[in-house]
Image (spheres, rainbow, N blue to C red):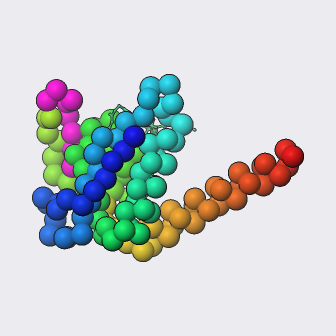
Amino acid sequence: MLSAGPERCPFDSWDSSWRLRGLAVVEFARRRGVATALLKSVIVRSHAKGARALWGMTRIAAVPVHTRLGFETIGTQYEVPPAGPHCSTFVRLTDELVSSLSDRQEAANGARRSDGRRRA
Ligand SMILES: CC(C)(COP(=O)(O)OP(=O)(O)OC[C@H]1O[C@@H](n2cnc3c(N)ncnc32)[C@H](O)[C@@H]1OP(=O)(O)O)[C@@H](O)C(=O)NCCC(=O)NCCS
């Protein structure tokens, strides 16, 4: 699961920012790209609804999933009790970023469709 909605970013003057909250994947489904797919989907959908940046308070363990998609870390690590160490993350939703993710999604969908045809 992952939720996102408009909320002004505390470390940027950008006024069309959305905040990410509650990224979590059930244990048995982890390390298969589910969180990455959720984040990509939020990037594309929030941009379509007018968001121009995304930010969040991210658990340290989840930072690599974010940075691989273009997020940067802001400032230093801090504690959020009882969850543990976090880092703020931020990405500007440029047209280039969004179209590169949409293209990759289209390519993945195309590969799945042709797999289906081969099996049929
Ligand atoms: C953090 C969390 C959301 C990640 O979810 P996930 O679905 O496992 O994330 P992904 O699969 O997209 O990526 C996780 C790792 O799996 C790897 N991975 C992705 N697809 C893979 C595949 N098919 N085979 C092997 N590894 C894969 C990724 O490269 C990534 O590696 P890294 O951790 O070394 O960077 C999940 O572990 C979780 O719910 N944790 C508890 C709650 C939490 O910490 N939430 C974050 C709050 S900000």
What is the x, y in percent for residue 5?
Answer: 28, 56
x, y percent for residue 117: 83, 52
Q: How many numbered discs sit on the rendered protein?
A: 0
Kindly give the residue lying farthest to the bottom in the view shown: 95
Classify residue 106 as left or right of residue 84.
Answer: right
Q: Is residue 90 visible?
A: no
Question: Relative to 104, is 117 on the left or the right?
Answer: right
Name the quarter showing ligand 1: top left
Image quadrant in which you'd find residue 105: bottom right
Residue at 14% over, 29% down:
81
- Residue at (12%, 58%) from the top-left corner? 10
Asked whether, in this view, residue 58 is left or right of residue 8, the answer is right
Asked whether residue 92 is drawn in magenta, I would say no
**Residue for point 36% across, 44% down:** 2
Question: Can I make out residue 7 in this image?
Answer: yes
Please report the bounds of the magenta region as a residue range: 81-88
Judge whether residue 82 is colored magenta. yes
